Image (cartoon, grey):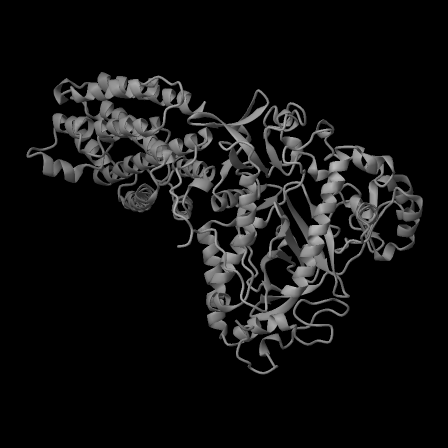
Amino acid sequence: MGKWRPESRGTDIGLIEGYAPPDGVADELLKPDGTLRPVWRPLLEHLSQLPPEALAQRFARGDQYLADAGVYYRQYSDSGSTERAWPLSHIPVMIGEDEWTHLAEGIAQRADLLERVIADLYGEGRLVQTGAIPAGLVAQNPEWLRPIAGVKPQSGHFLHFLAFEIGRSPDGSWFVLGDRTQAPSGSGFSLENRMATARVFPDFYARAHIERLAGFFQSFRSALYDQRHDADGRVAILTPGQNTDTYFEHAYIARYLGIMLLECEDLKVVDGKLMVRTINGLEPVSVLWRRLDSRFADPLELDEDSALGTPGMVSALRGQTVTMLNCLGSGVLEARAFMAFLPRICRELTGQELKLPNIATWWCGQASERQYVHQNLQRMMIGPALSTKLPFDIEAATVFGGKFRNAAHQPIGNWLEREGASLVGQEAVTLSTTPAMIDGALVPRPVIVRVFAARTPDGWTVMPGGYARIGRTEDPTALAMQDGGSVADVWVVSDTPVDRTSLAQTDKTPFVRRLPGRLPARAADNLFWLGRYVERADFALRLLRAYHLRRTEAGPVATPLLTKLESFILGHGHPLDSEIPDSLIDLFEQARNCATKVRDRFSTDGWTALDALAESARALAQDDGDVALDDDDGADEVDASRKLSQLLRQLAGFTGLVYDNMFRFAGWHFLTMGRALERAGLLTTMLAEFSNPDAPPGSYDLAIEVGDSVMTHRRRYSVDVTRNTVVDLLALDTDNPRSVMFQISQLNEQQAQIPRRAGAPAMTEAARRILKLETRLAVATPEAMSAEDFRAMREDMRGISDAISQIYFD
């Protein structure tokens, strides 16, 4: 096949009229002579054919995809953190294949060099002994972990997945701004950027020769499984949890690669082996992709205050029972000061120069280097030697252009002399610019690119693309999303057709039906409680709606039923001084919190529906006026009922979506068990109060209404609502999906589907309790059921819940 070229539309492209990069700055779009780089022409010609309205619609399409997929970043402030929309810059960064090939060679060489350095730092220590690396830069580095010294990784390598921050200098060459060896993030966001950008330009992307990303992840996934020393060992990602700003990425990558997503509480070290707690008991973990900073990984040997670690993790590494990506202590290489020594180390270890040089760096602990930095202050950035931030990231004690960034300081010369060993000077680089669409026009903005490399059996594989950070202004210090910066996809463009590898199976892939993997106990626990919180919210909505409707009918009169209902609702923790109480919003938030913890096992549609439900509840609450209990016009009550009905419909949509579409694996069984147990418990609590013979008038109708069985009752019984019909329909009916009996039968069916642990008795304690309660209900009659019976059943259900927790979650 020949080279792909779009139809020529001449050399003038109106879209770039007025596009003017700053003088002395390289630009990704334009050559130094101001002409268009060939790699950009096809995309710009395509864009020029689109009217502004069509382009805006395409950008909105990409943003909508990201919103629907739940992609966000966490914005931090003094008051806490909030989730913000993903700031996609819709115009990708374009790099030609030949240029990328040179970059990839440099990245692979650098990755090999870093592996040799860290192996020496935790091994023989010759680089420190010979003075190639000053001892103080290692000993004083908080990421240098003494317990890892002497540890030999089970895989034979310390580093498996790396990222590098790179920029283009004014002369057009690329250089490294930072090495990311600790727990590099961004690869998952690169995938989502690609998905969104492909939706912005679907027709162009489909026919253009843009290198795909799936092949990179396919190779890395194969490498992960190849690292297993035990065929039954699990492959997993270790995440700090949902409060980290990259949690979405962790869940996304785990789902994309089909591997477990674990937190520290999922893990346990037994006899020197790393194990994961599952509903089937402890299972071995062979490969752990760590997305947690090293020092938090083991409170026993590292940071004793860490609440994120697993005691004994270091001993498992020391015993070579698990392969960790990257090995603990790898963050030591991220310190800025190491860049001052890497060029020389590369020459000494390999006999070669760095193919991809890093930013020029001078450690001020050496007299000659300190003097050079002092003499060239105007073109220096001076900051902490052990910092892992990029040179232009704002820090309190940083000199830029001969001036401190913060308030007045001591003379810089004195500062360098006294604290030189803890400082580095780095060349004040000028970043290249790339086009960003702002207010309908292309404007140049500073850019850096994060590229990724993964170790495979064939050596280092570099992702053909990456993750670009783009400044909101011409100021290179405003690249971070926290400072208003945006992100963009990186397209590597080939002259010939590209491999369109996908992680999805093709017709040529041998058919294999994979059995679902083991379910971590924490995931089962969260799914179980997700079902319970959703059912609590459903019951609360129905109770509150029934209350407001009866307030409308009663007017200012405090009827016995209203008085009892108010007491019942307050007893369930729902105040009645607002239409949408905070307690109801809390239930939605608790449900969303549980779903967040199992994002890797939860569908995007289900998550979006639940998130929208929680936001709707908050929005309706903000539109909430106080409900005056002595108002007699009923307007507030009607409005409250309308809002509650709206939330009920949304909740019904969510539950239908989840229960109809969720694969019937172990997680679904726990979700269903939680929902059934909660519904049964709430029904028995209600029946104990409102099915009594001495209950206030209207209680039976209330029970049928809250039990969502009004139509069923009309069809099932030829008489008016009586106590016996209420108890029969809501407690004993085997066909009513709202009855207690139906829920207990569901519990029995679901628990029977969960695989038993090896050596477990034929009947678990939970199964025994469920069967007893089911039998009790099966032989009961409406006439014989009393309030005490219902209260006793409620206690039985608490016992069932405890038994399930002890068997599967503890």
- Residue at position x 50%, y 42% in the image: 254
Image x and y of residue 652, in percent: 30, 43
Q: Is residue 112 left or right of residue 238?
A: right
Image quadrant in which the C terminus is located: top left
- Report which quarter residue 170 is drawn in: bottom right
Image x and y of residue 111, in percent: 70, 47
Q: Establish if 696 lies above or below 587.
A: above
- Residue at position x 26%, y 41% in the image: 632
Image x and y of residue 805, in percent: 40, 23
- Report which quarter residue 787 is drawn in: top left
| Depth check, front residue: 444 or 199 | 199
Image x and y of residue 738, in percent: 23, 33
Q: Can residue 401 be seen here? A: yes
| Depth check, front residue: 267 or 653 | 267
Q: Establish if 304 lies above or below 369.
A: above
Q: Is residue 169 left or right of residue 274?
A: right
Q: Can residue 567 be seen here? A: no
Q: Residue furthest left?
A: 718
- Residue at position x 47%, y 51% in the image: 503
Number of residue marks = 0
